Image (spheres, helix red, strand yellow):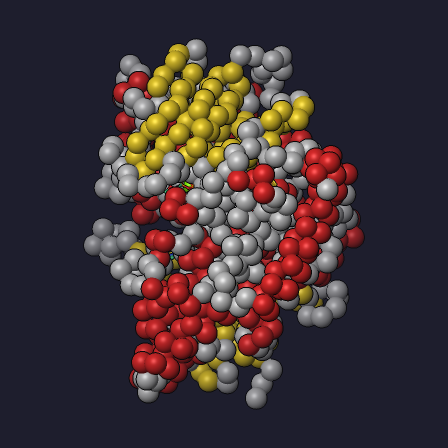
Amino acid sequence: MSLVNTEAQPDLLVVQDFSLRFRGAPSDQINRVSFSVGSGKTLCIVGESGCGKSVTSLAMMGLLPAGAAQINSGKMLFEGQAMNLADPKAMRKIRGSRMTMIFQEPMSSLNPVFRIGDQIVEAVKAHSDATDAQARDRAVAMLQRVGIPAPAKRMRDYPHQLSGGMRQRVMIAMALVNDPALLIADEPTTALDVTIQAQILELIRDLQAETGMGTIMITHDLGVVAEIADTVAVMYAGTVVETGPAERIFNDPQHPYTIGLMSSIPQLTGARGRLSTVPGMVPTARNMPAGCRFSTRCPFARPVCTTEPPLVEIGDGHQAACHFAPLEIKLKESA
Amino acid sequence: MSDNILRARGLKKHFTTGGVVMGTAGVIRAVDDVSFDVRRGETFAIVGESGCGKSTLARLLMRLLSPTEGDVIFDGIDVRNLKGRDLTALRRDMQFIFQDPFSSLNPRMSVGKLIGEPLETHFPDMSGAERRAKVSELLDKVGLRPEHAERYPHEFSGGQRQRIGIARALASAPKLMIGDEPVSALDVSVQAQVINLLGDLRDELGLTLVIIAHDLAVIRHMSDRVAVMYLGQIVEQGTVDTVFQHPRHPYTRALLSAIPVAAYGQRLSQTALHGEMPSPANPPSGCRFHTRCPYAQDRCTSQAPTLRPTGNGEDHVAACHFFADIAAAEPDPGRVGTPPRAAGASARFALYQDAMQERANVRSGQDQKQQAEPKPFHQQESST
Ligand SMILES: Nc1ncnc2c1ncn2[C@@H]1O[C@H](COP(=O)(O)OP(=O)(O)OP(=O)(O)O)[C@@H](O)[C@H]1O
Ligand SMILES: Nc1ncnc2c1ncn2[C@@H]1O[C@H](COP(=O)(O)OP(=O)(O)OP(=O)(O)O)[C@@H](O)[C@H]1O
Ligand code: SF4
Ligand code: SF4
Ligand SMILES: [Mg+2]
Ligand SMILES: [Mg+2]
């Protein structure tokens, strides 16, 4: 969809083999997670609540609380520069300028005692030589673009004077004002109604086309995923269980968790019977099963599933971590 | 007894903001003349733009806020002046489910305490043993297990915490539950579990549900009737099927055409609605939607439309001067439907359903033999 990067380009960002364990946990909560995003492209990360989406993105920003988590492995390649995820110092230089993030909780990321205008101006000046006046102009222009009316006036507001939806848009403006090469957006539109959500998605698409910004979008709204994703990574219990081009994930899902997730979506037409679900609950670090982490809930589970299934290529960059992918063929073979 | 369990009549809530001293005092018309009836046993949904007054309305219905004007009649009783024991009875009969399963449960209370607390309040005569038995029963009802009573909220996933919240709301044996975005913090598979649960409870216990949600597919799935709000007022109301298939108010049309569909290749071509919602402190004259309505005419800036029947049967009403003309000129925007599923996806969904069914059959066979065994698979739900 974007105008930039129609040819295959080297990836803007590559994350490889990221593993993390919280203090005192008996197993790695995040287990060898890898993914990549190209310039001007959007990767959507989806998965069950608590599967590690936010933790992964905080690690990329070097923002995990020190001491709480131990990063056991993980490399990051960003704009050609190699970094070690276990060493957050390297990320400090790019954070806020080349790589920015819209956080899941807008309230906790705006400072309640400062005017929103000053907060955005501060963000501009921290990463450029802009004068006060220049920084102010850029802040106003960006507030305008995220659809805040009378932005020059609104600059003087404190966060509590804005509705939830407006606060969310201020956060988005702050993340975009420095023209980042990569935007990480964690549930950016969950608090917004569908019409405002559509405006925000359009804005992100425009910026991708204009500046070649790459985007990682974390969301549980599969409608949003269908709308903007070039590629999708599906996570379950700290692992990437399926990844590939959006079209393949929607039209040819292969991992049983992805299939369960997709078939749980309420539809806009047709019968309104009982929704299909993924029964049961996600295992905690304490009762993580050996082998496939989905095996406690998978209707296809077999004895072999107590060994860890690797991510295998099914074609066109589409990969699934299941002993029985592609499903129809392998199930028949095993029957 | 009337068939309407809850009636709102001319409800208004105006907040005063700013300081008189600073000369910035203003009145925010968060809810501005809202009337509707909720029928016993139905699920009634409220949708609308962020900031249009949905949460304020819910709090008025619960009498957590008192209205500036207007009345709420619950089960034939005007709740405005309820005090003491009568107010406690209202709190028992009408329960609230919060949006956020993470912050709405006290982290220092065990699940048993959390659910036992409303039992203590509303049924003080219950013995400790009776209360524990009731807690177990409630946990079972929401798909959790009795031993979960010993645990604390942080040990549960988002969906399970929402179940705990629902068990807590059910404890007082309410007649009506109001959910303000009860499933929007949940991922779709967990969301589906909670939607199914609420539907079951409604059928089993004859509950009435009032649901506020952003997700229109969720609303369509759960509800019988829906009210669409814009800037403090209801602009359209009717059965879910009618409103989704034949929306009449231009705002509803915009809303429905902005829903992203979870199917590949369904990108929206353009933004459905431009401009910002006007401030409820200074609502536009005439039709409040005229500043953003693509069909607005001169009359709309001076004359406020009222809700009137659309002729689409079963009390479908809309507040727009020109809905008949617009409907005649423009086809119904309802998406002709989700496109047919790709062959691969359909095949995979069918495989998954069959496998689930098979597991469920095996399990129910085993269950009869070994009731006491832990359940490794499929702990909470029936499979369809
Ligand atoms: N500081 C911490 N100490 C211990 N465990 C933590 C900490 N922070 C997060 N976790 C755990 O790590 C796991 C991943 O959490 P994360 O917030 O990344 O989930 P998520 O995928 O973003 O979920 P959601 O969709 O609900 O936002 C969870 O099980 C969470 O409880
Ligand atoms: N205590 C209050 N004081 C002043 N204004 C308030 C107060 N509570 C709500 N408002 C205002 O009333 C309007 C309606 O708010 P409300 O929270 O009911 O909206 P909502 O429809 O629930 O929005 P959302 O979808 O974002 O939750 C908003 O403009 C809000 O800023
Ligand atoms: S490896 Fe086994 S348990 Fe895991 S998803 Fe595949 S079939 Fe299911
Ligand atoms: S009354 Fe006029 S402005 Fe209001 S919705 Fe109808 S056409 Fe639009
Ligand atoms: Mg998260
Ligand atoms: Mg609200």
Please determine whether, in this image, residue B305 is positioned above or below residue A95.
Answer: below
Q: Where's ligand 3: which quadrant?
A: top right
Which sits in the foreground, A81 or A256?
A256
Question: Would residue A230 be seen by someone viewing this image from the given angle?
Answer: no
Looking at the rendering, in which quadrant would you find the C terminus of chain B?
A: bottom right
Question: Would residue A323 be seen by someone viewing this image from the given angle?
Answer: yes
Please determine whether, in this image, residue B110 is positioned above or below residue A24.
Answer: below
Q: Is residue A129 left or right of residue A149?
A: left
Which sits in the foreground, A160 or B173?
B173
Please determine whether, in this image, residue B164 is positioned above or below residue B154.
Answer: below
Please determine whether, in this image, residue A224 is positioned above or below residue B255.
Answer: above
Residue at (50, 25) in percent of width and height: A35
Residue at (50, 38) in percent of width and height: A291
Residue at (58, 43) in percent of width and height: A303
Q: Is residue B61 left or right of residue B23?
A: right
Which sits in the foreground, A88 or B247?
A88
Q: Is residue B365 left or right of residue B125?
A: right
* Residue A264 percent location from the top left of the image: 61, 50
Quadrant position of residue A93: top left
* Residue A5 percent location from the top left of the image: 58, 15
